[in-house]
Amino acid sequence: MTLPALPTTRRTFLTGAAALTAVGYTAGAAAGTTAAGVPWARLTVLGTTDLHGNVFNWDYFKNAEFTNAAADDIGVAKVATLIEALRQRHRGEPVLTLDAGDTIQGTPLAYYYARIAPITEGGVHPMAKAMNLVGYDAAALGNHEFNYGIEHLRTFESQLDFPLLGANAVDPVTKRPVFPPYVVKELPLHNGVKVKVGILGLTNPGIAIWDKANVEGRMEFPGLVEQAKVFVPRLKAMGCDVVIVSAHSGADTSSSYGDALPYPENASTLVAEQVPDVDAILVGHAHKDIPQRFVRNQVTGRDVLLIEPLYWGMRVAVMDLRLELRGRRWRVAGATGQTLNSNTVAEHPAVAAAVREQHDTVVRYVNSVIGTSAAAMSAARAVVEDVPIIDFVNYVQADAVKAALPAQDAALPVLSIAAPFNRGASFPAGEVTVRDVAGLYIYDNTLLAVKVTGQQVKDYLEYSVRYFKAVTTIGPVPMSEVTNAVTPEAPNGTPDYNFDSVAGLDADLTYDIDLARPVGDRIRNLAYGGVLVAGPEQFVLAVNNYRQSGGGGFPHVKTAEVVYNRQVEIRQLLIDWVTEHGTIDPAQFASSDWRLVSGGSPITVS
């Protein structure tokens, strides 16, 4: 199966100068002399971030061209066209192209060449092919670079024509970076002189938690500010006129994990505020579109430009830095930023051709039939009611753990947690493909199990149901007025993936979630097999590695005794279960374990 031609009725695709005009890009003179006779020139820095394995404008889970409500397009093939047009526009001027991380995880294309036909056994990663053709100068490491293990990352790194930077990925003993911390570029200006640019790469400290199984004992991840304070002065001492930071860390300072991290998760603004001599920061990780933001450095009083292009290649960042010659050194005298939309341009033919065969292979793989479903199942309402498709995840996880428990724990009841990762996931009645199952579990988590008490299960659930807003009526209430509550850890609303429900394997774990009660006291009538859970009972709880390593800040599971950890990927576990059993029958696993109530009465959610 090949990628179909994009429909010409959707929008008009352009190239070159016409494309830049269409996306609103403007740039004035490239160089000159100020009124005071000071020579000046322009340095342009282009940037992407959070590409997440997207080369084509394609949704593998829908087996169709990607689309969203904003009519965005995605993928490196689109990005490449914009970047080529920008370079043509700035021909003869210094131009750098950077990325801010999260490159090799996020699509079946990335998964296939990590797990099904891994690049560690031969072959070139499709993202390496695509990004090499674009001609990046450097990229920062993202946290998702570590999902498939260090060997996979190092193999990917070896296939790139540019460095992967990570000043705060350090050896636990020497505390020295285990990836290049920076790269220095000398670029010719219009008059033959050169400007020396230092590019510093910083990644996310949360890697130590989220990928603990892959990095523990091998790498540590100190804070962005702390490492920038070490390396920015070093770059200036090397004679760098300009210092650009590529940071896989959001601009809106926060941590999703409260006190679980010693360093803030989103620290780009702190770097701008606290580290002198940073001129601009390409921001990643937060999946936001920030065309231009200025942050005042607390030491120098100078403004630092921050810019974050929208994820998956939807936008390309453009930083135009005005350099002025002060003495014998160039200095940044001003800056502007904007993000350009890739949805008006055609895919770059060279990038598309280089990756087409690998893409077609993955399309065939994800559309292969592996079983049948006895009934249609959907995750559309999984955030407000217990639906069979989430029960399926819990059943498969708990069943795998139960079969592998050591003898001393074999008699313990097994529970499982699952979150509604993708409200668009569904199984049709009839044939089920790899992409149907993969669309249900879109993350590359592995399965673990820990030993907990009944009280700890209740604590876990109380924490989970902070996801819901307070509701004092039995409805009907719109779904949007029930879900995604704002909390101190989630000022933009609690994401769906941080709402876990819990189910039992051999008996039902049942509970009410009373949204009329205060946060921390919402779980009512918690019972296992019809018997109220009193507190000291012991259970085995199947969780994913993200939760067990502290992701989301859920209580107890990080410190609980681990009784199962075989590094089995949950998505592949689900695929393998369907392949082996052939039929997905809700009668085997579906149950009504939880419900939303207000004052004890069931809530109707429209």
Image (spheres, rainbow, N blue to C red):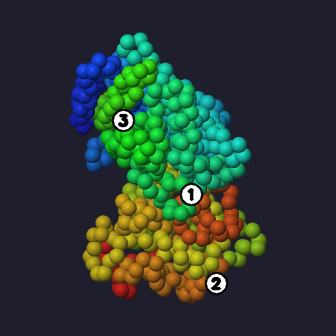
- Residue type highlighted by circle 2: Pro
Whether residue 390 appears in this view of the structure is no
Looking at the image, tell me whether mark 2 or mark 3 is earlier in sequence order.
3
Quadrant that contains the N terminus: top left
Image x and y of residue 318, in percent: 35, 32
Q: Tell me the SS state at disc 3.
A: strand
What residue is shown with label 1? 262
User: Where 407 falls versus 47 (above or below)?
Assistant: below
Give me the C-alpha separation between circle 1 and circle 2.
Answer: 32 Å
Give me the residue at 58% from left, 87% from top: 534
Q: Nearer the viewer, residue 309 or 440?
A: 309
Image x and y of residue 162, in percent: 54, 28
Whether residue 475 appears in this view of the structure is yes
**Mark 1, mark 3: which one is toward the viewer?**
1
Give me the residue at 38% from left, 21% from top: 325
Q: Tell me the SS state at disc 2.
A: loop
Give me the residue at 45% from left, 34% from top: 244
Give me the C-alpha separation between circle 2 and circle 3.
Answer: 55 Å
- Residue type highlighted by circle 1: Pro
What residue is shown with label 3? 317
Q: Nearer the viewer, residue 193 or 318?
A: 193
Q: Residue furthest right?
A: 407
User: Where 451 falls versus 345 (above or below)?
Assistant: below
Quadrant that contains the C terminus: bottom left
Marks 2/3 in contact by CB < 8 Å: the verdict is no
Marks 1/2 in contact by CB < 8 Å: the verdict is no
- Residue type highlighted by circle 3: Ala
What residue is shown with label 2? 536
User: How crowded is the residue under tag 3: few (<14 C-alpha within 10 Å), some, or many (20+)?
Assistant: many
**Mark 2, mark 3: which one is toward the viewer?**
3
Quadrant location of residue 565? bottom right
